[in-house]
Amino acid sequence: MTAPYDEDPVWEAAWAWVQREFDQDTFDAAARAEMTAWLLADPLHRARYDEAARLWLLAGMVPRRTGG
């Protein structure tokens, strides 16, 4: 069985944008403009980005394991 987004280039791009935006200090105005252009290029881009962003935020709510 495959996951719904296996081998989906739009999902992969959306996930990469989310990681860049939320996890890197190097997300500057140029990166924001590039991402905005990508989001506006196709409604599916925005849909996948929104899904990826929700997943990112939900994952951040999961407590980290502590050593021990």
Image (tube, rainbow, N blue to C red):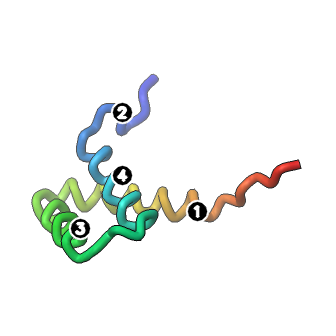
First in sequence: mark 3 vs mark 2? 2
The residue at which mark 3 appears reads as 31
Cα distance, mark 4 to mark 1?
15 Å
Q: Are marks 1 and 2 in contact (CB under 8 Å)?
A: no
Q: Residue at x 28, y 38 (%)?
A: 8
Horizontal side of 42 relative to 47 (left or right) equals: left
- Identify which amino acid the numbered label 1 is placed on: Gly
- The local secondary structure at tag 4 comes to helix
The residue at which mark 4 appears reads as 15
Q: Residue at x 24, y 71 (%)?
A: 32
First in sequence: mark 3 vs mark 4? 4
- Identify which amino acid the numbered label 4 is placed on: Trp
Q: Quadrant of residue 34?
A: bottom left
Q: Crowdedness of circle 2 by 10 Å Cα count: few (<14), some, many (20+)?
A: few
The residue at which mark 1 appears reads as 60
Q: Residue at x 48, y 59 (%)?
A: 56
Q: Position of residue 49 (x, y in %)?
A: 31, 59
Q: Position of residue 11 (x, y in %)?
A: 31, 46
- Identify which amino acid the numbered label 2 is placed on: Asp
Q: Position of residue 19 (x, y in %)?
A: 40, 58
- The local secondary structure at tag 3 comes to helix
